[in-house]
Image (cartoon, rainbow, N blue to C red):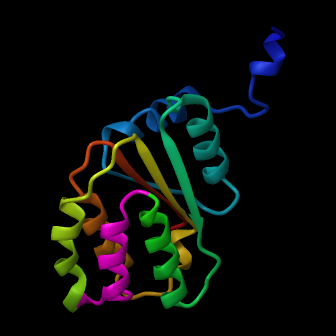
Amino acid sequence: MDKKADQTPYYFSDKLKKELEQIPCHPLTIIEAPSGFGKTTAVREYLKQTLPKNAVALWYTCLGEAASITWASICNLIESVNKRLADALKKQKMPTMETLFEMLPYFRDVECKNETYLVIDNNQLIHSDIPHDLLSVFAMHGNPRVHIILITQP
């Protein structure tokens, strides 16, 4: 086999590679850098090159839609992992500060058979007053096979 066929057309520093290698060790990873720094490309290439065959990587890219559409899209992403959790979250609508921590029991009980990576790209475009608090809930899901990756700008 030709060595060139196996090589990625991108260069990633050793420091970045070491940082990306930590993704499977955490329930939530936040990747933040200004526009144009290659965040999405780095995550895509990392997942493409390192995921085991039975692992799943699912993506949602926020385009600045209304909060209700964004929440429905995030729930649809979660539905690929656990329909019961997604249905419960859909009923809650876009979380508010009052309902945010009511979600915790749903996230703590998430079940997933395969190693799964849920990527939410352009997180900075989510039109909500609580995206940072929602991150706390995402980080508490409790399943070692589920990894949420948020790609955002400062």
Q: Position of residue 113 (x, y in %)?
A: 34, 43
> In the rendered structure, does residue 87 fall within the stretch colored magenta?
yes
The image quadrant of residue 140 is bottom left
Image height check: is 60 above or below 4? below
Front residue of 12 and 61: 61
- At 29% from the left and 90% from the top, the residue drawn is 96
Residue depicted at x 50% and y 29%: 52
Left or right of 50 in this view: 86:
left
Is 96 one of the magenta-colored residues? yes
Quadrant position of residue 25? top left
Tell me residue 92's x, y (percent): 30, 87
Identified at 46% across, 60% down, the residue is 80
Total marks in image: 0
As drawn, the residue found furthest toward the top would be 1
Query: Going by the image, does 131 lie left or right of 50?
Result: left
Q: Is residue 20 above or below residue 2?
A: below
Q: Position of residue 65 (x, y in %)?
A: 60, 86
Camera-side residue of 21 and 35: 21
Look at the image and tell me whether residue 64 can be seen. yes
> Looking at the image, can residue 95 be seen?
no
Left or right: 83 in relation to 8 = left
From this view, report whether residue 45 is shown above or below residue 103: above
Task: Write down the region rendered in magenta.
Answer: 81-97
Q: Main secondary structure of the magenta part?
A: helix
On-image quarter of the N terminus: top right
Percent of width and height locating residue 120: 51, 63
Task: Give above or below for 45 relative to 63.
Answer: above
Residue at horizontal 66%, vertical 53%? Answer: 37
